[in-house]
Image (spheres, rainbow, N blue to C red):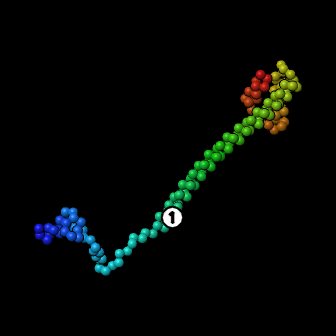
Amino acid sequence: MSAAVRGWAGAAGTSGCIGARVTTGRRLPRLRGERIQEANMDWTPIVAELQKVLATVVLAIAVYAGKLLIAYLGRKVQEQNNAALSAVYAKAIAAAEQQFGSGTGPQKLDWVTRYLQGNGVPIDSALLEALVYEVTG
């Protein structure tokens, strides 16, 4: 076997693979005496942009959560107002029933309406009628 063939076919100092010549123990030559420098990348601009994006996302989530919270609190306040209004209406209707007795519907309605208006309670006719049927049976 010639020396050229042995160099490619597994001579000492090579990997033994046909077609691949890898020498061991030798350093790669440097280009014209230049030092090989590590690739140091400045991450500051990328991190700054990521912080801006993250801040925007967090702000959007906070705004959406705030809208949901305001809607939820609005519903809760409305429910409490309706419950309080129903309680006031029911008490006024019960008082009218005790004062006027049965069979005097228009007088009781007039009295309840004047009583509620005198105390600054808003009048909701549908709710008032529903509670009259509920209280009087």
Residue projecting furthest to the top: 103
Mark 1, residues whose alpha carbon is within 10 Å: few (<14), some, or many (≥20)? few
Residue at x 84% of width, y 33% of height: 115
Which residue in the rendered view is the most extreme toward the bottom? 33
User: Foreground residue, 100 or 42?
Assistant: 42
Q: Viewer-proximal residue, 127 or 136?
A: 136
Quarter of the image with the N terminus in it: bottom left
| Residue 20: image location, x then y, percent | 22, 65
Residue 27, placed above or below residue 96? below
- Left or right position of 73 against 21: right
Q: Circle 1 sits in a helix, a strand or a loop, which is it?
A: helix
Q: Position of residue 56 (x, y in %)?
A: 54, 56
Above or below: residue 50 compared with residue 103: below
Q: Is residue 37 visible?
A: yes
Would residue 9 be found to the left or right of residue 64 on screen? left
The residue depicted at 78 percent of the width and 25 percent of the height is 135
Q: Amino acid at mark 1?
A: Ala
Q: Left or right: 76 with respect to 103?
A: left
- Residue corresponding to mark 1: 48
Q: Quadrant of the rendered structure where residue 73 is?
A: top right
